[in-house]
Amino acid sequence: MATDGITTGKRYYLTNRDQRTGLHVAAHGNWDWVFAAKDEYDPGEPVIFHEYEGGGYVIEHTYRHWDGHKYWARHKNGVYLGKWGPATVWHTRPTENGLLLHKETDFVSSPDSSGTKWVETRDWPTFRIVIRRSWSIEGALNESPDERKLFEFELIPA
């Protein structure tokens, strides 16, 4: 087990600690895109962490619409499922209540909207922890008024 508590090859739900809402994928265009569950206590679909040589993880989503396209890949601001080649190597940063996923200074986040909460990656060179009922980390102090939220994940064995 790594120092961040992740056992590679094991299935986990990546959930919000308070509401137990997890992550799903939906076909949009010709790709599967990752989004946050809308309903409270919806754990989403499990993911599997694969250790990457040189550090970090490649994340495999266990549900998908296209064979072979199962690894989280960052594209501009979104996260889609791709093949191993374009997969993003993610790193973890521990928090009081779980962990953050990031690639360099781009952290996994979501807009605070009532529609589909597509998972995004945004540059958060600085951020502050704010304890709230849902998704308890808020982004950089100079972020736009829509207050995109960083995802603070809890790992729940599937």
Image (cartoon, helix red, strand yellow):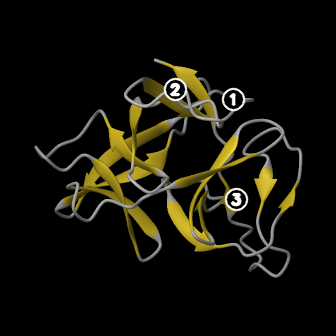
Q: Farthest top residue?
A: 158
Dot 3, how many residues are within 10 Å of its Cα: few (below 14), some (14-19), or many (20+)?
many
Q: Secondary structure at mark 1?
A: loop
Q: Secondary structure at mark 2?
A: loop
Q: Is residue 13 left or right of residue 152?
A: left
Which label was assigned to residue 149?
A: 3
Mark 1 and mark 3 residues within 8 Å of each other at the beta carbon: no
Q: Position of residue 73 (x, y in %)?
A: 35, 61
Q: Amino acid at mark 1?
A: Gln
Which residue: 64% across, 40% down? Answer: 153
Name the N-terminal-most of marks 1 and 3.
1
- Quadrant of the snapshot with the N terminus: top right
Q: Amino acid at mark 3?
A: Lys
Name the N-terminal-most of marks 2 and 3.
2
**The quarter of the displayed image where residue 54 is located:** bottom left
Dot 1, how many residues are within 10 Å of its Cα: few (below 14), some (14-19), or many (20+)?
some
Q: Position of residue 127 (x, y in %)?
A: 81, 67
Name the residue carrying label 2. 43
Q: Tell me if residue 32 comes above or below residue 88 in the rendering.
A: above
**The quarter of the displayed image where residue 60 is located:** top left
Q: Position of residue 66 (x, y in %)?
A: 13, 46
**The quarter of the displayed image where residue 108 is located:** bottom right
Which residue: 42% across, 58% down? Answer: 89
Q: Tell me if residue 27 comes above or below residue 86 in the rendering.
A: above
- Quadrant of the snapshot with the C terminus: top left
Which residue: 41% across, 24% down? Answer: 11
Label 2 to label 1, Cα distance in Å? 9 Å
Q: Secondary structure at mark 3?
A: strand
Which label was assigned to residue 19?
A: 1
